[in-house]
Image (cartoon, helix red, strand yellow):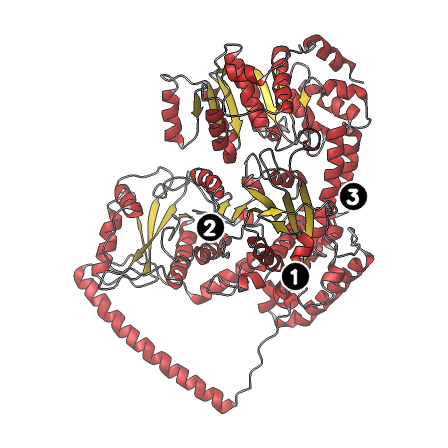
Amino acid sequence: NMTDILARIKKSVADKKKTPVAQSDLQKWGLRGIQLRAYQLDGVQWLTQCLSNQQGSILGDEMGLGKTCQTISLLVYISGALGKKGPFLVLSPLSVLENWRNELECFAPSLNVLCYKGDKERRAELQRETKTQDFQVLLTTYEMCLKDASFLKQWKWKVLVVDEAHRLKNQNSLLHVTLTQFSVGFRVLLTGTPIQNNIQELYSLLTFIQPNIFTADESDRFVKVYSQVQTAELQSILEPFLLRRIKSEVAVDLPKKTELVVYHGMSVLQKKYYKAVLMKDLEAFGNDQGNKNRLLNILMNLRKCVDHPYLFDGVEPEPFQIGEHLVEASGKLCLLDSLLTFLHKGSSEHILYTLLMFSGHTRYSYERLDGSVRGEERNLAVKNFGSKDIFVFLLSTKAGGVGLNLTAADTVIFVDSDFNPQNDLQAAARCHRIGQTRPVKVIRLLARDTVEEIMYSRAVSKLQLTNTVIEEGRFSLLDQAQSAAAGLQLSEILKFGIDKLLSSDESSIQEIKLEKIVGSSRDGQWVEDEEQNHMYYFEGKDYSKNPSSDDQKSFEQLLEEQLAEFQKAAGEGRALRHKVSLSVTLGVPSRKRKPLTEAELELRRQKRAEAAAKRAKLQEDLEKKKMAWWESCGYRSLCLQPVDSEEEEEEEEDNSSTCFSDSDRTDIQYVLGDVTHPHTAQGDAIIVHCVDDSGRWGSGGLFTALEVRSDEPRKQYELAGKMKDLGLGNVLLFPIDDKQSRLNGQDNLALIVAQERDKANNLSGIFLTALDDGLKKIYAAAKRKNASVHLPRIGHSTKGFNWYGTERLIRKHLASRGVPTFM
């Protein structure tokens, strides 16, 4: 047993004084603008008692019960009742930093708050201000804390508050280790999920708040003792340090939350690529342990296929245009489109969560929050969502799943599911929380008979067991929760449902009567149905959540067919070497044409050869005249040469084997900062800017910023204009280190001629064909120089600009081909 820990608790933690804290007391000490509920006052009282007895506490209330306002009330108590004016340090995720500042200013206006964020120069300015200006609360993010730990360590903090404290669940993490080095009087951890996977995580939190009792070297013994049996002793250990209430117990007036799952089918294209992914790396299925990473790669690509086949490079037909084909190619988007149409009739607001963002095709007003959205834009997006003009808030679970208050919405739609069910719980709580006045629907879209279905089913099983652990203290069930998630081999999970899914090549997308499934609304609110409280929608059928013997047989049959195709294609040589996984398994039919006679073929060849010779002669004459003129003027073109078609084909073939690789390593990286000073520490960099064909350098924005950086951009661009060297698709490339330079690399500027300006000075939009040509050339240059590429938000303020197509081109030509690409 752990009687020594109990002894230390009894010795170190005195019995809590039952001094009540009333609303009037808090108002007297400085609380404004909020009326705390009874359970919240109890929470504040509990925190004040912990403050007088121990080093720290964990406020583990279920998400949405007001942990922030209880914590602010504690700071008001310390400042007003105890006369300790700080300093207090509050750490939170970036997405809720502004919410913390707003609530501190609203509920505790007497506390002087310093919001510590920004780039290196801005933070240096704030550091100087702290020497002359007093503050009581320093509010910052985990990342800023780690970057400037040496600065923050100099303070003796009265209180440290860590919001979303499950970030500390690993006691060896950099954040955990760094914060333990701070001088702190009292630690408050806020988390709606004190345990996500195992009791080790809880012990890490306890070690952080009370290291003299829960020592790091006793971690293994604690886990071993209390993960096996349920004991009252463990409850006694946790009681002084952890307070957890759930909505069903303390917020009985909170409107009802109904959760349901709506299944959808798969398009023909999705089925073909689903089969292709399964067949691409057959050797991985031979050994689960030895091939775990390869199997996980297959799993991720199957999930991408379930979301949308266009997530794979080369699948979407060019030119990249927004249209109905985006919806029709994916069963998930077909259902989502129908669902949004149905919900729009109700005229209320909705939250859309997805791991892979789809915002290019929508006819509804929306805000977006994901990793590409900058800090100031995030705050504006949250504020705008309160407006009646915004129908949908599109978020990723990682960027918008914690801390936000989005009670303006009454519907949460999970387009795809997170591997960790706790993340989805966090995300749903953005809507179903204190302050919500309407019934809430949580709708999850799942692809039937795919890995998405079995992964979600297993996550739900794990979540139910974990909840039992947290609510009832039955920690012995954690092992059962872990085994429930890991009972099947990964290779078996990947085979789930393929017997039904691939029994037909035809689309399995069907129309669904949404009102019957989702329910009806009245006056902009969901109508509460006492009988409708189900978690799944099964269309009256019982679907197994384990791979069946038929799934295994179907996989073996696919394997036999694949091997037969390989043998058949063995003599066809080079063409199948890299592309057999797609060309064979997809079985895309070729278009049948009427065969030409030998005479007709010869005549066609002659005509083509004559036309090509005429074009070549004309081009040669023009080129000679232009070169003679340039030579007489002493002009040397800085334009990149066109990419050789054979070289491009070889490059594409070399990269074809990676068409299903992990997108995280080959995606656009969105960063903050000045694009004229590239986001790279070493190596060459290419800055990209789009210009028109007029030869007249612009003013303002990036034009001015580039002139500040270097004299070369205006000089080279205007010279190229005089020499008629600004054809659409041309790219001028030259160094710009004449005024400022880096020690470990050269900065270059690439000007893509992607717009036309007529004689009346009217400027066209950006031509995607010209941008396409330009990006091909930049890729070749970046490859030669081993350089990274840095772009502004091309066309960001251009009316009618096709950002969707532009982003696809940048990803296609640069990021997906291994060039470090920063936006």
Vertical arrangement, residue 758 with respect to residue 16, above or below: below
Q: How far apart are labels 1 and 3 at the CA level?
A: 28 Å
Q: Secondary structure at mark 3?
A: loop
| In this view, the mark in front (1 or 3) | 1
163 above or below 607? Answer: above
Name the kind of residue labelled 3 in the image: Gly
Label placed on residue 819: 2
* x and y percentages locating residue 488 in the rendered image: 77, 46
- Is 70 placed left or right of 538 in the picture? left
Residue 48 picture quarter: top right
Select label 3 or label 2 by which is in front.
3
User: Does residue 208 appear in the picture of this structure?
Assistant: no
Along the line of sight, the residue nearer the viewer: 135 or 268 = 135
Measured as percent of width and height from the top left, residue 10 is found at: 73, 10
- Residue 580 lies, in percent from the top left, at 62, 65
Quadrant in the rendering for residue 765: bottom left
Mark seen at residue 487: 3
Q: Earlier in the sequence, mark 1 or mark 3?
A: 1
- Residue occupied by mark 1: 266
Residue shown at 52%/26% (left/top)? 91
* Kind of residue at badge 1: Met
Quadrant housing the N terminus: top right
Q: Is residue 128 left or right of residue 534?
A: left
